[in-house]
Image (tube, grey):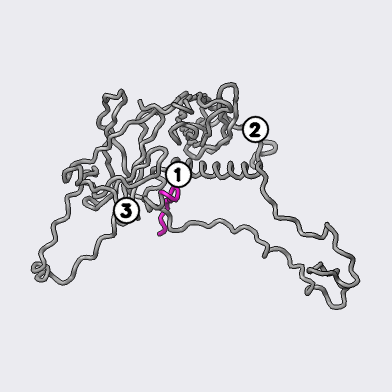
C-alpha cells in the first residue's frame, strides 16, 4: 500500500524521509518540436515553388533580402521583466515554505503513529525570557526501536538534533541504552555462524547521540524559548528513515475568538514578514473573506474552509516605505459571489445552517524590524 504521507519540502524529504512513494510529475513545457512542420518537402507534387530564403548569397532571379527578412535578435529581458521573474521566484519559495509549515504534524506523519509535545514546566530565566520544558509522548512506535529527533526552528532548515532515542512502554521518548559490547574474536568464533543483518544507518550523520548528554532511559526534555506566535516543531523518525511522526506546540499563541470562531497567527519567519493565519469553527466548505488592515491600507483576501470549518492562509506582511508595524486580520463573512454551482432560481431561500456562526474574530500581530521578541 502506498503511504499517504508526503514530504513538506525538499529539505524535509531529505531529513525526514517521510515522502510519498508515488509523486505526480508536472507536465513538460511545450517545445519547438511540438510546433507544426513547415518544410518544403511537405508541399504536394506540382505545387508552385516557394521563394527560397537567403542562405548566405543571392538566389538568381529573386529580389535582394531586406531588413524585414532578417531573423529577430534573441530577446534580452528588460530590468522590469527581470524584477518580475525574481518576484515570482520569491513568491514560489514563500508558497512552498508556507505549505510545509501548514502541513507539519499529522499530515506528514506515518498513519498509525503520532507524537505530542507535553509541557512539564515554564519559568523565567535571568535574561527575562521564559524557558519552557517539553517531553515527547507517542503512540504507534515499537518500544525499544531506535529513533532520531528532528527540530525545525524559524529561519533555519529542519535538521537531525539527536540520535539514539527510543520510546518506553508508556510511549515517552527516552535515551536508549547503549548496545551491548561486541564479544572478543575467540568468542565470535564460538558463536553461531548466522549473524543478524546490520541495522540501517541512522539519519542525520553528525548529530550527537543522546548518551553524550543523557543517562540511559532518561526522558527526553526539550528546553526552549519562544516569541508570540512561534511554533516549536519537532519530529521523531525511525532508523529505517521510512516512518515517523511530527508535531508542534505554540507556547505563546496570538489568537482571537468570537462566538465559536477562532483565528490564530503563526510566524513563518522571525520578522513576521510571512505568517500563517489559521482558523477553526467557521462555516464548512464555504468561500470566506478576511480583511487585512495595515496602517491605512485594507485588503480583502478570499479563502475557503474545509469540511471541518478550518482555514489556512499564508500572508505577506509589510507596508511600503516603513520597516515595521502591525497588521490586523479579521473575518468578515461568507463570500456571496455567484458560482456555477449556484442555482439560478432556488425554489425557496435556504435557512442558515447551524454550522455558520455569525462571528467576527480579529487578531493583531507585529512585523518588521525588531518585532521578534521572546516572551
Q: Residue at x 29, y 29 (%)?
A: 131
Q: Callout 1: few (<14), some (14-19), or many (20+) C-alpha neighbours within 10 Å? A: some
> Looking at this rendering, what residue extends furthest in the bottom direction?
45
Q: Residue 301 versus residue 98: which sits nearer the camera? A: 98
Quadrant that contains the C terminus: top left
Is residue 169 something that shows in the picture? no
Q: Residue 138 versus residue 93: which sits nearer the camera? A: 93
Position of residue 104 measured from the top left corner of the image (x, y, whole percent): 41, 43
Q: Which residue is mark 2?
A: 348
Position of residue 253 measured from the top left corner of the image (x, y, whole percent): 39, 28
> Looking at this rendering, what residue extends furthest in the top direction?
296
Q: Along the polypeptide, which appears first: circle 2 or circle 1?
A: 1
Q: Residue 57 versus residue 128: which sits nearer the camera? A: 57
Q: CA distance from mark 2 to mark 1?
A: 43 Å
Give the quadrant of residue 197.
bottom left
Q: Which residues are magenta?
A: 1-11
Q: Which residue is mark 1?
A: 100
Task: Examine the residues drawn in magenta and state their main secondary structure.
Answer: loop
Q: Secondary structure at mark 2?
A: loop
Give the quadrant of residue 136.
top left
Rendered position, 245 above or below 254: below
* Residues marked 1 and 3 touching at CB (< 8 Å): no
Q: Which residue is mark 3?
A: 203
Q: Is 261 inside the magenta-drawn segment?
A: no
Side of 103 where 360 appears, left or right: right
Amino acid at each position: 500500500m502506498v503511504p499517504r504521507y508526503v514530504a513538506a519540502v525538499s529539505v524535509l524529504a531529505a531529513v525526514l524521509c517521510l515522502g510519498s512513494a508515488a509523486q505526480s510529475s508536472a507536465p513538460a513545457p511545450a517545445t519547438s518540436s511540438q510546433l507544426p512542420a513547415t518544410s518544403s518537402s511537405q508541399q504536394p507534387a506540382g505545387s508552385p515553388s516557394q521563394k527560397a530564403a537567403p542562405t548566405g548569397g543571392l538566389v538568381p532571379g529573386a529580389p535582394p533580402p531586406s531588413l524585414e527578412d532578417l531573423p529577430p535578435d534573441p530577446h534580452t529581458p528588460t530590468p522590469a521583466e527581470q524584477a518580475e521573474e525574481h518576484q515570482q521566484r520569491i513568491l514560489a519559495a514563500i508558497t512552498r515554505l508556507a505549505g510545509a509549515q501548514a502541513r507539519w504534524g499529522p499530515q506528514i506523519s506515518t498513519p498509525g503513529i503520532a507524537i505530542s509535545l507535553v509541557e512539564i514546566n515554564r519559568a523565567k530565566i535571568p535574561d527575562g525570557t521564559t524557558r519552557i520544558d517539553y517531553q515527547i509522548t507517542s503512540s504507534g512506535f515499537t518500544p525499544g526501536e531506535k529513533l532520531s529527533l528532528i527540530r525545525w526552528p524559524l529561519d533555519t532548515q529542519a535538521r537531525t538534533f539527536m540520535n539514539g532515542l527510543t520510546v518506553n512502554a508508556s510511549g515517552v521518548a527516552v535515551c536508549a541504552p547503549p548496545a551491548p559490547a561486541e564479544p572478543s574474536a575467540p568468542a565470535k568464533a564460538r558463536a553461531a555462524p548466522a549473524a543478524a543483518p546490520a541495522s540501517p544507518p541512522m539519519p542525520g550523520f553528525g548529530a550527537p547521540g543522546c548518551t553524550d548528554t543523557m543517562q540511559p532511559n532518561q526522558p527526553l526534555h526539550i528546553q526552549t524559548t519562544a516569541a508570540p506566535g512561534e511554533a516549536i516543531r519537532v519530529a521523531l523518525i525511525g532508523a529505517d528513515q521510512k516512518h515517523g511522526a511530527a508535531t508542534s506546540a505554540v507556547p505563546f499563541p496570538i489568537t482571537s475568538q468570537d462566538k465559536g470562531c477562532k483565528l490564530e497567527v503563526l510566524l513563518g519567519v522571525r520578522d513576521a514578514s510571512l505568517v500563517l493565519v489559521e482558523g477553526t469553527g467557521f462555516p464548512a466548505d464555504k468561500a470566506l473573506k478576511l480583511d487585512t488592515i495595515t496602517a491605512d491600507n485594507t485588503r480583502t483576501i478570499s479563502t475557503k474552509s474545509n469540511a471541518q470549518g478550518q482555514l489556512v492562509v499564508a500572508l505577506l506582511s509589510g507596508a511600503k516605505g516603513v520597516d515595521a508595524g502591525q497588521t490586523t486580520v479579521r473575518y468578515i463573512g461568507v463570500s456571496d459571489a455567484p458560482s456555477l454551482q449556484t442555482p439560478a432560481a432556488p425554489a425557496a431561500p435556504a435557512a442558515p445552517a447551524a454550522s455558520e456562526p455569525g462571528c467576527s474574530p480579529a487578531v493583531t500581530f507585529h512585523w518588521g524590524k525588531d518585532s521578534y521578541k521572546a516572551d
